[in-house]
Amino acid sequence: MGLTWSKPERLERTQLKQAPKHPAVYRLYDATTLAVIYIGETQNLAHRLKAHAQKNWGDIAVCFSFVDELDLTEPHLRHEIE
C-alpha cells in the first residue's frame, strides 16, 4: 500500500517506553525471517504493544513497526488500512 513503516524494534517491555500513545496501525513479525505474524490497529499503540509483549511467542523473537504518518484517530480509517 506504499505505507512508510517505522524502524523495526524488538517487542520487549524495555523497548516500549518509546512507543507512541496515539492511534496507529502496526505489524508484528518474526525478527529472523521477517515473516509477518500479526497486523493490527489500535487507539493507543503503547498500551496495545505492552499487551502483546506479555504473550508467550515461544522461541520466536518478535519485532514491531507501525505507521505514524497518517491521521488515524477514527477507527474506520485504521480498519481500512489494517
Image (cartoon, rainbow, N blue to C red):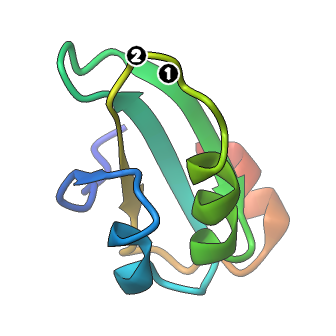
User: What residue is disc 1 on?
Assistant: 37
Give the percent coordinates (x, y) of residue 60: 38, 20
Q: Position of residue 5 (x, y in %)?
A: 28, 55
The type of residue carrying mark 1 is Ile
In what element is the residue under mark 1?
Answer: strand
Residue in the picture at 64% in, 44% down: 40
Front in this rendered view, residue 6 or 79: 6
Residue under the point 25% across and 57% down: 4
The quarter of the picture where residue 32 lies is top left
- In the image, 14 versus 77, the foreground residue is 14
**Residue labelled with disc 2:** 59
The label nearer to you, 1 versus 2, is: 2
Marks 1/2: CA distance?
13 Å
Point out residue 21 in the picture as x, y percentages from the top left corner: 58, 86
**In the image, 43: left or right of 5?**
right
Identify which amino acid the numbered label 2 is placed on: Asp
Q: Is residue 11 above or below residue 13?
A: above
Q: Which mark is residue 9?
A: none
Q: Quadrant of the C terminus?
A: top right
